[in-house]
Each structure stands twice: as C-alpha cells, then as structure tokens.
Amino acid sequence: WNPLLAYLRNTMLADGTISPGDLNLFTVSDDPVAIAQVLSRTARSQFGLRDRVTRPRWWLFERAISSGNSGGAGTDR
C-alpha cells in the first residue's frame, strides 16, 4: 500500500487533483476482519443499515428454534 499512498500524497495531492481531506476518505489494511468491521460500522452509521432478524418461512417448512433446547445436534423433540 505504501507506493499507492505515496503516489496519492506526492503526486495527486501536490498537483491539486485531490484535496487533503480526500486522504481521510478511505482505510488501508491488510486485515480482512478489520476492513469488514469498518464496512459494517460505516453501513450502520452513515446509511442506517441494521441486522435483520431471520424469521422462519412457512412455505419452506421452516420452524422456529426454541431458545431453551440444549439437547445439541440431532435431537429433534
């Protein structure tokens, strides 16, 4: 990322192609988890997105999972 950041600062910013504030409009990271967190935080704060509660669909023959079932996998009751 260093060559790209150097180009943005030394060439584009120096030539007036971008403004100093433009360098704060993006996040650079090699960590995909960190980027996913930035995207999630931005989507929530700037665009009002939120997690959707998934509900069972009767036409798919889905049923709600009871929160009290601690029987583990494969224990249909």
Image (cartoon, helix red, strand yellow):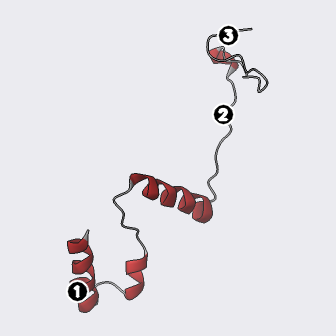
Q: Is residue 40 above or below residue 58?
A: below
- Tag 2 or tag 3, which sits nearer the N-term? 2
Asked if disc 3 and disc 2 are in contact, CB closer than 8 Å, the reply is no
Q: Is residue 57 above or below residue 7?
A: above
Element under disc 3: loop
Please provide percent x and percent y for residue 18. Answer: 32, 84
- Report which residue position mark 3 lands on: 75
* Mark 3 or 1, closer to the camera: 3
Q: Quadrant location of residue 71?
A: top right
- Tag 2 or tag 1, which sits nearer the N-term? 1
Q: Nearer the viewer, residue 2 or 25?
A: 2
Label 2 environment density (alpha carbons within 10 Å; few <14, some 14–19, many ≥20): few
Position of the N terminus, as image quadrant, is bottom left
Q: Nearer the viewer, residue 46 or 23?
A: 23
Position of the C terminus, as image quadrant, is top right
Please provide percent x and percent y for residue 21. Answer: 42, 84
- Residue shown at 43%/58% (left/top)? 35
Q: Is residue 68 left or right of residue 3?
A: right
Asked if disc 3 and disc 1 are in contact, CB closer than 8 Å, the reply is no
Q: Residue furthest right?
A: 68
Which numbered marker is on residue 62? none
- Real-space CA distance between mark 1 and mark 2, rounded to the nearest whole angstrom: 48 Å
Q: Is residue 47 left or right of residue 30?
A: right
Element under disc 1: helix
Q: Amino acid at mark 1?
A: Asn
- Real-space CA distance between mark 3 and mark 1, rounded to the nearest whole angstrom: 63 Å
- Report which residue position mark 2 lands on: 54
Q: Amino acid at mark 2?
A: Thr
- Tag 1 or tag 3, which sits nearer the N-term? 1
- Residue shown at 25%/91% (left/top)? 14
Which numbered marker is on residue 10? 1
